[in-house]
Amino acid sequence: MTRHVAVIGAGIVGVSTAIWLRRAGIDVTVIDRGAPGSGTSHGNAGVLAACAMVPVTSPGLVTKAPGMLLNPDFPLFMRWGYLPKLLPWLRKYVAHANEADTRRIAQGLTPIVGDAVEQHKSLCDDLGLDDWVRESDYCFAYANRAAFEAESYTWALRKEAGFNPMLIEGQEVRDYEPALGPDLGFMAIMKNHGFIRSPGGYVQALAQAFEGMGGTILQAEVKDFDLSGGAVSAVHTTQGTVNCTEVVLATGVWSKPMMAKLGLNVPLESERGYHIVFEDATGGPARPTMVASGKFVATPMEQGVRCAGIVEFGGLEAGASKAPLAFLRRHAAKAFPNLKAKSEVEWLGHRPATSDSLPLIGQVGDTKVYTAFGHHHIGLTGGPKTGRLVAGLIAGAQVNTDLAPYHPQRFSTKT
């Protein structure tokens, strides 16, 4: 049988994988129930956050978390009715909030995100899509030096990974970013970063380029694998059966039920994220800016200024909550007091959160099913690198990255 890979998921990871597979001369069908780039890859801060390799589960989280949840002015929210279902995952998640695990996870994430700008450029190379990727500084705005130094543990890990910020304060901050409010007087500036001017549009453009390379996109829902011969030979969808020699599972948090069909119970939860686009806005930042007090990022995009961030736990079924959106508006108005927009667009999406903060990248046993999901809030940043790695595994190319930290069978096989 001629090699034919079915890629499940038309977000940045799936489409990136598909493009690299086509470059290797392999036939590919991308399958998704939605249009390319319409899911989680659409709704994010758009930052190519190469320095975002430190997990949330740093030492001290266990003692701090209850206060964070009860503080209405902290960007962590819980739909309390979901807590009983969340608890098994949550226990595993917070168990990693120690020095050894934090360092191990940071070392694991660095190869996936550390060269993000270069990876996105390589993905776009010869596709005529370079204009979607904008090189820029990535800024972290603080009230003062003391607030910056309160995060010294995170910055020390970044420095060890080669990410050294330029620090400015006082009038230098005003000169560098006039849009910032008077309460933000200190800034850590990361050079050699970037952003995508419209994440959803970018993934759509990549998908169109993939079709131009001879790839196929099928809008359908995948229901099951055919593993009757021990290795996958087809996927069954709502639009019929797609025969294939390999499968790539890149459908984010919705990958969990598909993994269960392989006998793997992956501890995967939705890290619910929000954004507000202030359309045709004025008074916003000139480059992506993380406002440390609110843990959200404001990015100048094609539509306007997008403010994105927030972590809410509440599963896949519940609709948007009012409190996270109110939080974003309140903190955006404080950080950028002259921000004005013609209209606003709200969004809620589901970021795939593994209990150990590392993605799943690799083949499940000898099934010919390859995983490429579980990136938490760094999916856009690390999508092209992940896709390149998985495509390399399938094509038999040399992979110069240690994939052991991302092994898809590192969790219990008990379902």
Image: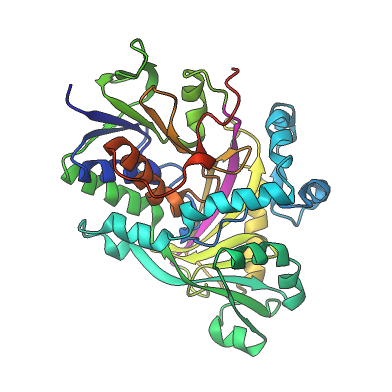
Q: Position of residue 30 (x, y in %)?
A: 29, 34
Left or right of 161, for residue 294:
right
Above or below residue 372? Residue 105 is below
Q: Is residue 198 above or below residue 176?
A: above
Q: Position of residue 40 (x, y in %)?
A: 47, 44
**Foreground residue, 175 or 226?**
226
Visible residue check, residue 264: yes
Dividing the image into 4 quarters, which one contains the N terminus? top left
Is 356 located above or below residue 131 in the figure?
A: above
Residue at horizontal 63 percent and vertical 72 percent from the top: 141
Range of residues picked out in magenta: 266-280
Residue 113: where, in percent of width, then height?
48, 55
Please give left or right for residue 361 compared with residue 18 in the image: right
Provide the major secondary structure of the magenta segment: strand
The quadrant where residue 153 appears: bottom right
Residue at 40% of width from left, 63% of height from top?
A: 117
